[in-house]
Image (cartoon, rainbow, N blue to C red):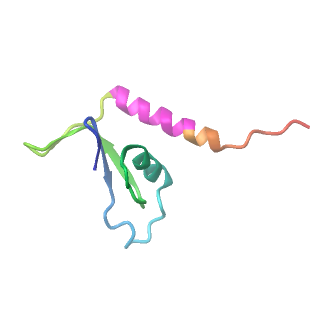
């Protein structure tokens, strides 16, 4: 599924049948890019753009990969409770 003109997310099409857990991060990311994304289950893989003329899948550029990692880590850190001072 093309998220943008430069980013593609590949999802496991048989994840539900294999009883894989829901992937809340992939579902949230799709919600940001798609009007009616639905839920995604199992693992996903991100690549660069796919050239429809040649079916060539391009890898992520370094800045794309780092941006995805930063967004993921920021989201994870936002959910970690802060230790309370006594």
Residue 60 x %, y % = 30, 34
Q: Position of residue 85 (x, y in %)?
A: 87, 36
**Residue sticking out furthest to the top:** 63
In the image, 39: left or right of 50?
Answer: right
Q: Main secondary structure of the magenta part?
A: helix
Q: At 48% across and 64% down in the image, what residue appears?
A: 21
In this rendering, would 6 be left or right of 77? left
- Give me the residue at 43% from left, 44% from top: 32
Q: On screen, 58 above or below 35?
A: above
Q: Position of residue 1 (x, y in %)?
A: 28, 50
Q: Is residue 52 above or below residue 6?
A: below
Residue at the outermost right position: 86
* Residue drawn at point x = 12 percent, y = 44 percent: 52
In the image shown, does 4 or 80 lie closer to the viewer?
A: 4
Tell me the magenta residue range.
62-74
Q: Residue placed farthest to the left in the image?
A: 53
Q: Nearer the viewer, residue 2 or 55?
A: 2
x then y, percent, for residue 16: 39, 69
Q: Residue at the location (36% across, 26% down)?
A: 63
Q: Residue 43, located in which quarter of the rendered image? A: bottom left
Could you tell me which quadrant the C terminus lies in?
A: top right
Residue 76 image-quadrant placement: top right
Numbered-mark total: 0
Q: In the image, is 20 to the left or to the right of 6?
A: right
**Residue in the foreground of this view, choosing between 70 and 29:** 29
Magenta-drawn stretch contains 83: no
In the image, residue 70 lies in the stretch drawn in magenta = yes
């Amino acid at each position: 599924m093309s998220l943008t003109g430069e980013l593609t997310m590949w999802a496991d099409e048989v994840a539900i049948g294999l009883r894989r857990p829901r992937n809340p991060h992939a579902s949230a990311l799709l919600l940001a890019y798609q009007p009616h994304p639905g839920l995604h289950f199992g693992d996903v893989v991100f690549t660069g753009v796919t050239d429809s003329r040649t079916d060539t899948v391009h890898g992520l550029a370094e800045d794309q990969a780092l941006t995805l990692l930063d967004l993921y880590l920021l989201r994870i850190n936002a959910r970690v409770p802060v230790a309370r001072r006594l």
